[in-house]
Image (tube, rainbow, N blue to C red):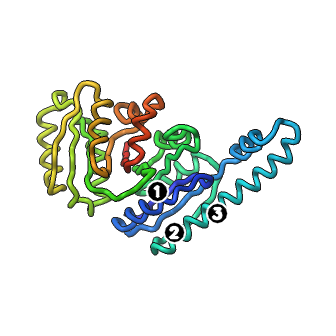
Amino acid sequence: MKKILYVQDALNYNAVNTEFIDFIYGLTGCRISAFFFEDKETARKLSIQQADWEGISDLKATAVTQLREICNENVRRFTTACHVRDIPYSISRMSRQLDGIVQESRYADLLLLDVGDYDDTVPGDFARELLCYVECPVIIMPLTFLGVEELVFTYDGRESSSYAIKQFTYLLPLLGNYKAVVVCINPGMIDEAEWNKFREWIDGCYARIEFLYAEGNVAEELFEILRKRDHPFIVMGAYGSGLVSELLNPSQADPVIQLTSHAIFIAHQ
């Protein structure tokens, strides 16, 4: 692996992110290219909250200044944390522009994404859109991080799920000694030959494997399985359609908030 991107709203920096970045750096030894984006629309919202429309220009200017000070402080907190942990990094600051990050992802191996509630939803609108268009695998960073005790792979026999598992395994080979839990989704619908080939491949990659099965209301059952796991690192397939899209649907607010306490790896072609 050569390049890891880290995308963060400069206004809502979560110090826990550095703990997770340190974990990923320990596995890869890769320099972190951090992108802190700043949203001027936030300043407008802040100024409107403080007063009526009269005198809004002065308040807006004050809000912009306050916003910049908060962003500067958050960037400083990040750089200090990286220095303390000896994590090599670079920093770019930008407006909230999807195209720029997508273009950067085209030549990156992995993107670390904070999906905090800066858009009042989890994941936020910006993060949700980025997940649809990003051109490298993504790790949705956990809101809290207490380490990883096991890997959880979701597998449904489709190309997207096997692709995600393979990408995760190739990018983070040092996790091969961790316990791997394969959640087989609707096993009766998976071709037997496909299943046998997958079993042969994954048995050669992970020493300790447990197989679980989810049927019927897959999203609900999968949430229940994941809720019971102890500090898992979750691996899922294509974001744009199917199971992952359903899991991250805004209507699933409570389960999604629960999932954000875990790291989630997503890859799509």
Task: Give the quadrant of residue 182.
Answer: top left
Mark 1 neighbour class, 10 Å CA radius: few under 14, some 14 to 19, many 20 or more: some
Quarter of the rendering containing residue 163 = top left
Query: For residue 10, which quarter of the picture?
Result: bottom right
Work out which residue is located at the far right of the displayed protein and give it.
55
Mark 2 and mark 1 in contact? Answer it, CB < 8 Å.
Answer: no
Who's the residue at 27% across and 31% down the image? 221
Q: Which residue is mark 1?
A: 107
Residue drawn where x is 15% and y is 54% of the image = 208
Mark 2 neighbour density, 10 Å: few (under 14) some (14–19) many (20 or more): some
Residue 81: mark:
2
Q: Nearer the viewer, residue 55 or 210?
A: 55
What residue is drawn where x is 40% and y is 38%?
239
* Circle number at residue 73: 3
* Image coordinates for residue 75, horizontal then vertical, percent: 60, 63
Q: Quadrant of the N terminus?
A: bottom left
Q: Secondary structure at mark 2?
A: helix
Q: Earlier in the sequence, mark 2 or mark 1?
A: 2
Q: Is residue 116 left or right of residue 174?
A: right
The label number, if any, that marks residue 230 in the structure image: none
Closer to the camera in the image, 194 or 96 = 96
Which of these two is toward me, 103 or 251? 251
Position of 123 relative to 61 (above/below):
above
Q: Please determine whether, in this image, residue 153 is positioned above or below residue 35.
A: above
The C terminus lies in which quarter of the figure? top left
